[in-house]
Image (tube, rainbow, N blue to C red):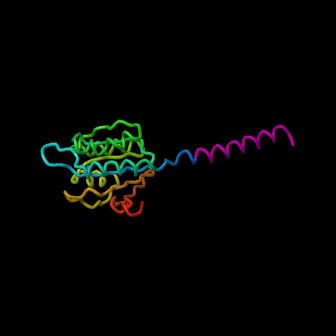
């Protein structure tokens, strides 16, 4: 085989492998956005969590520990921050605040960061944010609903939504 032919084959082989690796690099990695309403709250102005709410926030932290969450977001209300704090602490992250009056801006931020994230909001803002993220209808939440987890999975332009019931995911005390 001539040197010229060897160079042609080597160039063709390198071009082939470069094309394969470039194709794989163009595919974005999927990520998940976990949207929840704050846990059970006490009464009063800017209330904190009840004991049941504290337990739910701890459970959420444990559940998220298996999901490679890279960011934790919360509205700047005491009940929301207290729901987000256990997960952020367990993951070694700081809670980042967002303004629930500016959900479009938050949706753009979450999509541009392209990372697994927890977002703690409210019964009226959480489904609205999920709708913006998935560009699909999402069921509303009642004011007494604390067990709902909305998961928006994003891969490139494709977005899917799953609605989970935390009470179903949580093992019963009898199963321990």
In this picture, is 110 found above or below 151?
A: above
The location of residue 120, given as percent across then percent down, is 29, 47
In this rendering, position of residue 7 left or right of residue 59: right
Q: Nearer the viewer, residue 55 or 132?
A: 55
Membership of 5 in magenta stretch: yes
The location of residue 10, given as percent across then percent down, is 75, 41
Q: Nearer the viewer, residue 146 or 102?
A: 146
Membership of 148 in magenta stretch: no
In this picture, is 50 found above or below 172?
A: above
The N terminus: image quadrant: top right
Q: Quadrant of residue 150?
A: bottom left
Numbered-mark total: 0
Q: Residue at x 64, y 43 (%)?
A: 18
Q: Residue at x 19, y 57 (%)?
A: 143
Of all residues, the one furthest to the left in this rendering is: 44
Q: Which residues are magenta?
A: 1-22
The location of residue 25, given as percent across then percent down, is 55, 44
Q: Nearer the viewer, residue 154 or 141?
A: 141
The C terminus: image quadrant: bottom left
In this rendering, position of residue 153 left or right of residue 49: right
Q: Give the dominant element type of the magenta stretch: helix, strand or loop.
A: helix
Q: Quadrant of residue 117?
A: top left
Q: Residue at x 49, y 48 (%)?
A: 29
The location of residue 13, given as percent across then percent down, is 72, 45
Q: Residue at x 36, y 44 (%)?
A: 87
């Amino acid at each position: 085989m001539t040197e010229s032919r060897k160079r042609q084959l080597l160039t063709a082989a390198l071009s082939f492998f470069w094309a394969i690796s470039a194709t794989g690099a163009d595919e974005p990695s999927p990520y998940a956005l976990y949207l929840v309403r704050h846990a059970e709250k006490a009464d009063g102005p800017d209330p904190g969590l009840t004991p049941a709410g504290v337990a739910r926030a701890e459970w959420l932290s444990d559940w998220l520990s298996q999901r490679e969450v890279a960011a934790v977001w919360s509205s700047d209300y005491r009940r929301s921050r207290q729901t987000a704090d256990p997960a952020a602490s367990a993951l070694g992250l700081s809670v980042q605040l967002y303004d629930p009056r500016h959900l479009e801006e938050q949706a753009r931020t979450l999509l541009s960061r392209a990372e697994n994230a927890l977002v703690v909001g409210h019964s009226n803002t959480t489904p609205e944010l999920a709708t913006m993220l998935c560009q699909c209808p999402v069921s509303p939440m009642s004011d007494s609903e604390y067990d709902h987890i909305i998961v928006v999975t994003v891969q490139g332009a494709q977005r899917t939504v799953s609605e989970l019931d935390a009470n179903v995911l949580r093992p019963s005390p009898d199963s321990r």
